């Protein structure tokens, strides 16, 4: 019967591999983690040292509303109001348009790239010691043309990748560059000694590809969903160049909007100037006729008949004059529309008191401007251009029709006012006919003067708008660059590198552990067999493998004494049992069971136990080697072949001839080992030996290749199943599970042999505390 504390002794640890044990398994390889961590961080620092640094540059603008532009006419401002809304998406497309960006490329000479050459990397330069002027057609630049320009004390060396080389002195630049696709212009005001032995790499790109590349790189977007502020952004190696590009884009976009507004003002001024010549001629004719009429009729001053009648008459005449003015303006505008060339701008706000008509004219002008811009980039047969042209034709017809309708309305109103005027004039029936004619002449004069003054006012307004044209944008922020680069990100790169440095050895070890089919430590056994006792890990010794006498105090001796102590907890404790039988077996040969049997027997003998070491591995005996005896020395086989003999006659003295250690070798190798072991003679031997010895240690055969051990397993009090670190396959443990489940090996416990670890660090842990496991 087993002692009760035994079960508690060996079930104290979790059945599963705990996080602590797993962590300790990896910590044993801490130098790997340290080297990998340092190596990855070193590579990261090396990359940061030589990688191209990319900065984020940005600028912010606000598009101003054209409808709120400064305008002297209060009526026009009231009419336009704040109904016009800015389409930010349209403005964004204009900002990134080929037309605007091509102006930026031309101004900053962006189709020529300068790189200052370093030892391991080239840095983009915005202010080299010279400038390159391309002298090559754009069509021939199918791909970039590369040159190296080296500045020396008084000359420049031009080379390329095709072994081309030319030395040119500073004083001979203009004539010596014949045959090259560019001209070099030295920057003024520089001390060229500062650039001595400096090499630049120059790349010549086509302007079209440069503009398209800039359009791809330029980011334009609202700062927020409901905001009218647009942010322009660029990423590049040179912050100064990126900021210059952003500022130039803003300037060109603003200038483009201003030119659009000024173009409308100029067209209005030209139209009014044309009308002035016509009105001046008419006014001169009217004033001459009035003068002749007064001279012929001797008239100098006309008095009113009555104050009330005069007021009514004046009011009616004013209304008639106003309507006639509108009719004249309408007729003038209609003639201008009919007589103007195809797709020309119409005069805006010439004094017509019809907001709908003015809006139609404004929309017509917008289409003309849009067509003119599109025409700069496309041909006459482009679908978009033809669509806008058709829209303009329809709009022009719409303007004429609207003018006709408006003229009809004015004339109807004028007809009604004329009837009213006839009634008023009846009051003046007694006035002389001459007075009527004079009033008619003065009325015509007044109409022409009012029209002249109105056009003069509009001309002044257009001139003021042209002179003080409001910018099309408000600059919120000119080009700025974040001091922290966006690439490479030091914090992220170093963090990822550090984690990678820890992950790589972990992944390698994880795969190594996952595919490792060998038993390495006690956890590999206890994880599979948590209910079977594990006694001890026997360390690996490079030199000493055997007990050096009964009084040996070496680590090897202590490890086996600890094993003996742990075995004692498994031995039966009944009072009537004076001797115990310990079987030592293994799965296959080579796992060190015979060596362990020998050392364990000496360990018991060293603590004053009378021990008999029996060699029961009849097929492949090993014990004679540890005793320095011949393999054919008499032993167990000889006794089993002749059971009438006394087994004590086959006993040999053990280590140092001590009275506590005796050995029964296996003897000669028999042809029928299973038959001998299953005989009654072996049972009688065990029974008799237990009366003489305190401990009987039996070195049995491996259980997988032969069945010898299983035939005699019922005589064992404890069966030690020996495994060897780095040698025993883990799948063998499943065989041990079956043997334990079926009870074929009695009171089985595991021993792990030949474990490699640092004795200086782990000795106390593995041996002093092993007995508690």
Image (cartoon, rainbow, N blue to C red):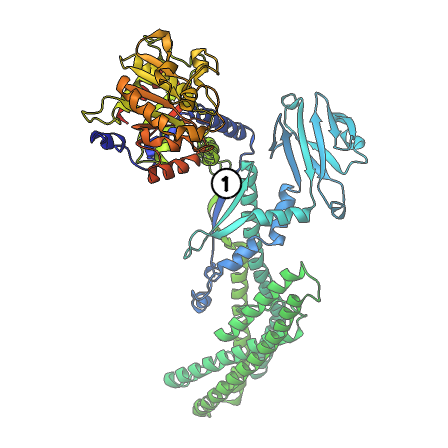
Question: As rendered, which of 729 and 656 lies closer to the eye?
Answer: 656
Image quadrant of residue 268? bottom right
- Percent of width and height locating residue 546: 40, 13
Q: Position of residue 338 (x, y in %)?
A: 65, 76
Between 603 and 471, the one nearer to me in the picture: 603
Q: Quadrant of residue 291?
A: bottom right
In the orientation shown, which residue stands out farthest toward the left? 575
Residue at the disc numbered 1: 56
In the displayed structure image, the side of residue 531 where residue 318 appears, left or right: right
In the picture, the quarter occupied by the N terminus is: top left
Spot occupied by residue 480 in the image (x, y as percentages of width and height): 48, 40
Identify the residue at image location x=28%, y=17%. Answer: 692
**Quick one: label 1, few (<14), some, or many (20+) residues within 10 Å?**
many
Name the spot of residue 473 as percent of width and height, x first. Answer: 49, 52
Q: Is residue 440 above or below residue 544?
A: below
Q: Residue at 64%, 61% (x, y): give it.
A: 374
């Amino acid at each position: 019967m087993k002692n009760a504390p035994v079960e508690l002794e060996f079930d104290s640890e979790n059945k599963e591999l705990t996080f602590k044990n797993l962590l300790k398994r990896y910590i044993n390889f801490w130098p790997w983690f340290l080297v990998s961590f340092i190596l990855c961080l070193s590579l990261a620092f090396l990359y940061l040292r030589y990688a191209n640094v990319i900065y984020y540059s940005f600028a912010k603008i606000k598009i101003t509303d054209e409808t709120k532009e400064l305008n002297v006419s209060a009526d026009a401002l009231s009419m336009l109001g704040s109904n016009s809304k800015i389409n930010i998406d349209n403005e964004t497309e204009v900002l990134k348009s080929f037309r605007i960006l091509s102006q930026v490329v031309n101004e900053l000479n962006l189709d020529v790239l300068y790189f200052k050459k370093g030892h391991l990397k080239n840095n983009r330069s915005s202010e080299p010691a010279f400038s390159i002027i391309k002298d090559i057609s754009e069509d021939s630049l199918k791909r970039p043309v590369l040159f190296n320009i080296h500045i020396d004390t008084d000359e420049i060396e031009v080379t390329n990748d095709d072994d081309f080389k030319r030395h040119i002195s500073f004083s001979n630049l203009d004539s010596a560059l014949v045959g090259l696709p560019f001209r070099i212009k030295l920057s003024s005001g520089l001390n060229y000694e500062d650039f001595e032995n400096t090499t630049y790499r120059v790349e010549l790109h086509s302007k079209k590809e440069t503009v398209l590349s800039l359009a791809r790189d330029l980011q334009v977007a609202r700062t927020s969903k409901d905001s009218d502020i647009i942010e322009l952004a660029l990423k590049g190696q040179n912050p100064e160049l990126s900021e210059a590009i952003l500022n130039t884009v803003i300037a060109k976009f603003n200038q483009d909007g201003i030119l659009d507004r000024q173009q409308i003002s100029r067209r209005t001024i030209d139209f009014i100037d044309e009308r002035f010549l016509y009105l001046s001629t008419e006014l001169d004719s009217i004033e001459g006729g009035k003068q002749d009429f007064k001279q012929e009729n001797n008239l100098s001053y006309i008095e009113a008949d009555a104050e009330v009648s005069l007021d009514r008459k004046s009011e009616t005449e004013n209304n008639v004059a106003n309507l006639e003015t509108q009719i004249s303006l309408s007729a003038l505008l209609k003639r201008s529309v009919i007589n103007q060339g195809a797709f020309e701008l119409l005069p805006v706000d010439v004094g017509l008191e019809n907001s709908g008509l003015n809006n139609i004219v404004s929309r017509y002008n917008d289409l003309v401007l849009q067509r003119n811009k599109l025409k700069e980039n496309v041909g006459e047969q482009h679908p978009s251009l033809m669509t806008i042209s058709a829209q303009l034709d329809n709009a022009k017809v719409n303007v004429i029709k609207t003018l006709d309708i408006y003229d009809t309305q004015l004339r109807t109103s004028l007809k009604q006012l004329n009837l009213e005027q006839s009634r008023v004039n009846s009051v003046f029936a007694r006035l002389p006919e001459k007075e009527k004619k004079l009033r008619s002449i003065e009325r015509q004069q007044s109409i022409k003067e009012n029209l002249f003054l109105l056009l003069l006012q509009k001309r002044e307004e257009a001139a003021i708008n042209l002179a003080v044209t409001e910018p099309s944008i408000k600059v919120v922020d000119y080009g700025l660059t974040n001091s922290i680069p966006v690439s490479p990100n030091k914090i992220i790169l170093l963090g990822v590198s550090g984690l990678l440095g820890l992950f790589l050895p972990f992944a390698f070890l994880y795969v190594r552990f996952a595919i490792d089919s060998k038993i390495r430590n006690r956890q590999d056994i206890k994880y599979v067999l948590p209910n079977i006792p594990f006694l001890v890990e026997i360390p690996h010794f490079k030199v000493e493998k055997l007990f050096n006498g009964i009084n040996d105090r070496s680590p090897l001796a202590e490890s086996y004494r600890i094993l003996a102590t742990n075995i004692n907890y498994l031995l039966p404790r009944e009072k009537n049992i004076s001797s115990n039988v310990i079987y030592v077996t293994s799965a296959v040969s080579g796992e060190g069971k015979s060596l362990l049997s020998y050392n364990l027997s000496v360990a018991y003998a060293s603590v004053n136990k009378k021990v008999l070491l029996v060699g029961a591995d009849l097929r492949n005996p090993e014990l004679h080697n540890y005793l320095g005896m011949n393999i054919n020395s008499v032993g167990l086989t000889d006794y089993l072949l002749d059971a009438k003999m006394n087994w004590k006659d086959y006993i040999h003295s053990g280590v140092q001839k001590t009275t506590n250690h005796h050995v029964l070798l296996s003897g000669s190798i028999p042809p029928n080992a299973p038959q001998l072991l299953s005989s009654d003679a072996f049972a009688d031997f065990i029974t008799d030996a237990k009366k003489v010895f305190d401990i009987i240690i039996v070195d049995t055969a491996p259980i997988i290749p032969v069945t010898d051990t299983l035939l005699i397993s019922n005589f064992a009090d404890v069966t030690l199943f020996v495994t060897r670190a780095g040698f025993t396959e883990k799948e063998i443990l499943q065989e041990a599970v079956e043997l334990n489940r079926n009870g074929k090996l009695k009171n089985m416990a595991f021993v792990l042999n030949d474990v490699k670890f640092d004795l200086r660090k782990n000795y106390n842990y593995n041996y002093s505390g092993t007995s508690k496991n």
